[in-house]
Amino acid sequence: MRVLKIAVLASGRGSNLKALLNASDTGRLSAEIVLVGSNKADAGALEIARKRGIPTCHLSSQQFKSSEEMDQALLETLREHQAEVVALAGYLKKIGSAIIREYKNKILNIHPALLPAFGGKGMYGAKVHQAVLDYGCKVTGVTVHLVDEEYDSGPPILQRCVPVQQDDTVETLAARVLQQEHVIYAEALQLFAECRVEVHGRQVLIKQ
Ligand code: GRF
């Protein structure tokens, strides 16, 4: 079985990174995480990676004159570690066009709602679940999608529903959605490991 080389970019605690490492340890994901990058020096994800001896990089906008320069540095780091696929897991910086061009249809993001609802700039973390509850939705979920130049706007690869319960709070809902995130991200990446993903415009086809 082919081993897919994945770079994970994360700005926060890194529970999705942990789930991907676990999926790879237990054989559900045929992948090696070759790099973990963050724009936040204190991201939990970097700590998780260091403990496992996974190469890390911290690139933040303060270190560069422009976002193009930062993108270039990130692109070179991805190349250096021979990443084939980039998995965004709570990475709060926009990915620049140079990286999107080079990794066309190879950059994934996970979003804690059913896109195109409750996505876009500024819609992350608790804000997403609060908006779902405020709207009175009966169902929310998780979307793993390809990344394009806008926030949360690339075509979905996999989506999964999570029912909203009448007594849900942001915390209880976020926790149930997160459980699904931890399952579905590895599944989506495994499709790439098995070369089963074909992209036709906005249609992402899964080959049997
Ligand atoms: C997850 O909810 C993910 O869907 C979103 O950011 C969060 C990251 O959580 N994009 P973690 O750092 O993986 O725990």
Image: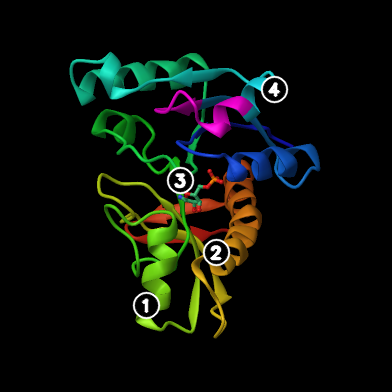
Q: Is residue 5 magenta?
A: no
- How many marks on residues? 4
Q: Earlier in the sequence, mark 4 or mark 1?
A: 4
Under mark 1, the amino acid is Asp
Query: Is residue 208 shown to the viewer in this render?
Result: no
Under mark 3, the amino acid is Leu
Q: Residue 175 lies in what quarter of the image?
A: bottom right
Name the element at disc 4: helix
The circle on residue 184 is none
Under mark 2, the amino acid is Glu
Name the element at disc 2: helix
Placement of 77 over or under 147, stated as above or below: above
Could you classify mark 3 by the number of other residues whose Cα lies within 10 Å: few (under 14), some (14-19), or many (20 or more)? many
Q: Which residue is mark 2?
A: 171
Beta carbon of the mark 3 residue lies under 8 A of ligand 1: no
Q: Which residue is mark 1?
A: 134
Image quarter where the N terminus lies is top right
